[in-house]
Amino acid sequence: MAETTETGLPRAVAIAWGMQEVPQRGPNRGLSHERIVAAAIEIADAEGLAAVTMQAVAKSLGFTTMSLYRYVSGKDELLRLMQDAAVAVPEKVSLPGDWREALRVWAGLVRDAFHAHPWVLGIPRGQVSVLMPNSVRVADLGLAALRDLPLADEEKIGVILTVSQYVTSTVELELNLADEGVVAVTPEGLDLLSQVVTPDRYPHLAPVLLAGNYLETQPVATGADEGIDAGYEFGLELIISGLDRRVHGQSARGVGDGA
Amino acid sequence: MAETTETGLPRAVAIAWGMQEVPQRGPNRGLSHERIVAAAIEIADAEGLAAVTMQAVAKSLGFTTMSLYRYVSGKDELLRLMQDAAVAVPEKVSLPGDWREALRVWAGLVRDAFHAHPWVLGIPRGQVSVLMPNSVRVADLGLAALRDLPLADEEKIGVILTVSQYVTSTVELELNLADEGVVAVTPEGLDLLSQVVTPDRYPHLAPVLLAGNYLETQPVATGADEGIDAGYEFGLELIISGLDRRVHGQSARGVGDGA
DNA sequence: AATACTCGGTTTATGGCATACACAGATTCC
DNA sequence: GGAATCTGTGTATGCCATAAACCGAGTATT
């Protein structure tokens, strides 16, 4: 299951950490993992993940397709390396002392990373990743943000997992909506919809969906981004707020509200 | 951009709602959207999303590959139809009166749906979906759960979006981890890791990662599922808790959130 | 009822993609 | 100097989505 021949770590992990015995014999290498990954990322940035084919990457480097396989066991591995390289976080990050602020900043870092390389979200999120350098870095930063929070390590991990998951999904949604205008439905389409999405069958949604302007009939309204951004903040504050409350010893489940 | 020839709705949407003019002339149809989608889902359930190829689906129905294209414009469309069909929610759902409980139940419904057809998470989450029957249904239920909550419609949508995003990500993580045991690293691998993930470079994470048992060296510990489940509850409660607090007029930010 | 139109299913063909395999030259180890 | 080993390449395979052209089955029109 994706082990290095000998180290007991997934190959991609070993490579990303730079621990991969470099062969001694044989001709000098014309390529490197770094160059390959960089080339692949460049393509992904410019033309999307779908354009990242072994052929395209190799060509952009002036090598044959098969040459890549001397460095990477297959496309999966390349994708994982790309993923890790793409979610890099600035060298120096200073997190505010207040954990709430720090968490916001941290979430922002993750978010920015995804915005910079949206295609990362299109990579099948199987396996590992957690052990890759940048993931480790990000996780460490996350824990740093929660440094002063009176929680068990396990819980802190839960928090940063929750937040990063949240950010991920949000960006994903965001990008999907950006593709088409909010949802992009013509007036005729809306008419048709109103015949099946009736208030009696969907009493709660129908009014909102049909009357409201969630279904823009124009490509994209200026307010779209704002709406999304607001949504992002909204959800994040929800989580932070919940955490804050939890730290103060109150849970939603428990009865009785002290202060 | 993926419109029906005439309705102004994405084809997949029209098909899923059963609004798609059935041709009058010509031979009787040997297939139907329903059968095709059902066959595809069966394959996905049994062998994973990757096994869902046009060829496989057609074969399982006893037809030629190309015959499918008489019903579906391409694989994308098929995938979207599968997605919608897969996230079906029970006919009768009774949501508790208390919105917190209701939200938990609702989240559970979504979660169950994903558990029943995990491959849904592997479908590229582009576009639409929101307008498909089951998405509409789920959204309606979500709003129903929040019925008595004193929030604007817009905000309620934000909530159910946040929660469903959260659930989605959680299940995804869950499944990824289930593939290999928690992270599946051999003792040797852990040794290697400890050489790069040093406490000085990653002061907050290193202790947790290396000392703790987050990296199981065994395929899967019995506690894994419990851990995940606990994580799910943890995050969900965070959101609910935050929401609860917000409703009670307090935000984590403390400044100018109104009331 | 005959004809024209339309549609369903099949056959065949194309092009893209990941990747296995085997070779020739380069480089290093003994 | 030779053996071993590694690099980059050329060639080949097989899977996959999908386009195009065709025949025969139905329906609508006259």
Image: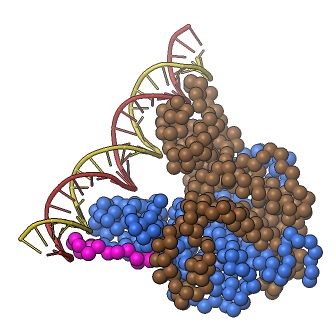
Chain colours: A blue, B brown, C red, D yellow
Image spot of residue B187 (x, y percent) = 50, 72
In magenta, the rendered stretch is A16-29
Residue B104 visible from this viewpoint: yes
Left or right of residue B217: residue B223? right
Nearer the observer, B201 or C12: B201
Residue B174, given in percent of the width and then of the height, sits at 64, 62
Residue plotted at (78% across, 84% down): B253
Within the image, what quadrant is residue A159 found in? bottom right
Q: Residue at point 60% right, 41% down?
A: B42
Left or right? Give the position of B242 relative to A50. right
Q: Is residue B197 above or below residue B165?
A: below
Q: Main secondary structure of the magenta part?
A: loop
Q: Is residue A37 left or right of residue B212?
A: left
Is residue B251 something that shows in the picture? Answer: no
* Residue A20 falls inside the magenta stretch: yes
Identity of the residue drawn at 74% across and 64% down = B163
Q: In this figure, what is the number of numbered marks?
A: 0
- Where is residue B112? Give x, y as percent: 72, 53
Image position of A149 with respect to B228: above or below = below
State the residue in front, A212 or B237.
B237
